[in-house]
Amino acid sequence: MVEWAAQFTTSVVRGNGLKRFALPSSVGSGLGSQRHAGSNFHSPSLSSTPTPPNPAPQPPPLWLCPPLWLCPSAYFLLAAAAGGHSPSPNPSPSLATTFLFPVNARKVFPCLDEPALKATFDISLTTTTGLTALSNMPVAATQDLPTGLTTTHFATSPPMSTYLVALIMGNLTSVSTLVPHPDPAKPARNVSIYGTPDRAGNLQTALNITASVLPAFEKLFGIPFALPKLDLIAIPDFAAGAMENWGLLTYRETALLLDPQHASLRDIRSVASVIAHEMTHQWFGDLVTCDYWGELWLNEGFATYFEKYGGTAARAEVRYFDTFYADETSYGQLVDAKNVSTHALATIQGVDSIGRVESFFDAISYQKGGSVIRMIRAYLNNRRISEEQYGLRRSLLQNDNNDVFITSLRKYLHANQFSTGTSQKLWQAVAQESDLPIGDWMRQWTYSGGFPLVSASMRDNKVTLSQAPFTSQGPGICDPANMTGSPPWWVPVPYISDTLATQDWSTQLHECKEEDVITVSSGTKWVKLNAGQYGFYRVNYTEPMWAQLATAVGVSAGGGGTVLGSEDVAGLLDDAFQLSRAGQLSITVFLNLIRSLARRPEPLVSAWLVGASPLVQIYQSLSMAEGEASCAADWSAFVQGNISTPAVANVTDGTTRGISLAGPISGSEAESESLRLLRPTLLSLAGYFNTTSVSQEAVQVLQGNADNVLGIDPDVRQLVYTQAVTHGGSDSYNIMKTLYLAATDPSEKERNLVALTYARQPELRQQTLDLVLQPSVRSQDALTLLSGVALRSNAAAHAAWSFLQENWMALYEKLGGDNEASRMMGRATQSVASHFATQTQIDSVNELYAAHEEYLSERSYFDNSIDSIQANILWLQLNAERVCAWLQSV
């Protein structure tokens, strides 16, 4: 039997005032009870036998949020959907956790459930004796009861939003350390990592990362962490991924725990980033909270940006900022360019529905928000970019007091701590510190959706610029009067050229068109705008300018003159491909750029992270084409012979082992880290396009090490798994399925699961899809299987779609049958349907929505699915024949 109950005392805080309020004194609340102004309520203990209250309490009409008696059936639902864990099928769960984000606190206790309405909390948690009880604050006292229960009383919290309240109880183990307070006169803070007992050996790396990130953030933000302790806990089944509850951060196991001996460099980067993301929220989100959900980007944008700094503080050699464009900006632009998914970073008014609240948790708030922060900080500190080898990163690490943006953030945090922030407050703080009209510059960026396309033309040594909204449906209209189009953005336009190696930040674009705005040296061959990819915009050039840039992409370091770095090459590739998808540029521009990249020997990680995916997308698009436009086989042969094989050969030139599957890479420390990141991308590309040396080696490595797969180099173990399942038939598939069912390490289990989605044979693919609904696959992993299968090929996408249609309700119920399940089903639909390219499939998406509309909280995912299909149709119409003709000409 597992029993628990909770008791709350709250005081509502708004602005600088504190207001206690009283509620009727006989009503239980969600996880127990809540007392206000001295009233004391109790709920029944929870056990395996339902004991609902008698009579059932009725909420008085004055309550703004209805109470909820948490009977055992609801408890088990909580355990399964929000983070429950049980080592065997039927016993009482040994771990339960709340997840109140964003609007679930009202289901648990009576409250004013809005982020701006902060309250202090006194929480007590009664559990079965022997279980660990955790909440936001440290334990103040414990009381053993004669009934075999223990009540844990937690210290009073500072004012905080209701969605940040957290309660956890369970059979847990932990590791801890003390982190000194920035003020030597104050006590050190206890930092702990918790997990289930079977994860005891995987906690230390997370503790080391956290203990490095905490003081780094305190120094950077200029405010000590506000609570006396910090706990991070790994939840075995946690669909949300991670949550920033103040002082009690919750994570999916794979987002927090590492086996240091068997983790890849990408695993380390990912875990450190997610830890740092949630820790950023302890300042941006918890200490200073967005005033209402329409300002969510103030929480998530800052967390997206500063997670890179936190990761760098913990593992500087991993070079997090090197891939910011590829990891964040590129995806943010992809979503923001679609009319069906774009929205402003901030709304001027509040948000009036739960569905609307949930719609803000997207790439606009996260990736665009972080990218806009990166852009304005780069502009305010642009001199450092030219002066320092690593640009803005070093000034972060060195806590540069001359960093105007960081100084303004410190003032913003100080002024609004324990309260709320708005975009207006933020830009006012930056404007005051920089003495620049930041509010005017950032108005369009903040309160309008979309972003600009900057078009450049060059005549002699003069460059003329114009801007217009960029959309995936085609060019928009720039209209200063805001009558027939969008008003212009403030656009910083740093540039480099073959005659200018250091970035010139003197150019800003304020109008729709500005003549001769840049003057370059006589004889300049090429000019690259948005140097360093700091700006959140795309750039289009004239055909001669693109041709010169394609030549420049192939020029390596050491040859003299300006060399385009990885971020700049990534930006060119991304702009060219997305412009072709929008019908604004020939696909041949991208093809010439990627062929030049393949000649570069440097490990240009960001460039390849951006450039590899379109090669696969083109193949899959050509596979949809019919007749003469169907040259998918020719395309595959071209990529293998002219891109993937030369790239592997050029990048490995001069290394001891190269980047085969055989073993680790040698080289300087910087080169080694970059090669380690690049190695899986290039080899995966080679394997996808049937390079037999990769596929055959993968099959041999897996089948030869089936009894000791952890001995495979962790940087390429996932690649070995996926390529072996792709090319190794049922033998490799059955090995992988056995490994998945037997795996206990969460990261290894996830690698096994992903590999199963690569099966090419229809019967093996169906086995993978059938696993989606099996108990052996956790609900948090079900969509990984479904969307993973859809990614592999057109035939696989159709198989995944058929499975989704036939099993929609069963999957919805597995995911919890609630609002979050509704959102996840929308994401599942989009992840599968986005691979199609016919009107018939658009009709099928609409039919699926109509059949299940009553279970869906929003239609946006289905609209995005249709938008993607239409974009695929357009790309085929505009580019398929061009690609086939280009292949004949090279």
Image (cartoon, rainbow, N blue to C red):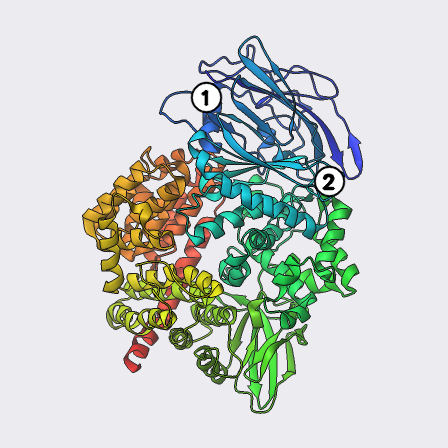
The answer to which of marks 1 and 2 sits earlier in the sequence is: 1
From the image, tell me which residue sits under label 2: 418
Q: In the image shown, does 317 or 496 lie closer to the viewer?
A: 317
- The answer, for residue 146, to whether it is visible in the render is yes
Which residue is at 50% across, 56% downward? 340
Looking at the image, residue 668 lies above or below residue 244: below
Camera-side residue of 698 and 288: 698
User: Quadrant of the rendered structure where residue 470 is?
Assistant: bottom right
Q: Which residue is mark 1?
A: 73
Q: Determine the image quadrant of residue 492.
A: bottom right
User: Left or right: where does residue 443 sit relative to residue 149?
Assistant: right
Percent of width and height locating residue 740: 31, 40
Residue 809, percent across and down? Answer: 36, 36
| The C terminus - image quarter | bottom left
Outermost residue, top side: 146
Q: Quadrant of residue 872?
A: bottom left
Label 1: state its secondary structure: helix
Q: CA distance from mark 1 to mark 2?
A: 36 Å
Q: Name the amino acid, label 2.
A: Phe
Amino acid type at image mark 1: Ser
Where residue 57 appears, as percent x and y from the top left, is 59, 15
* Left or right side of 89 for 282: right
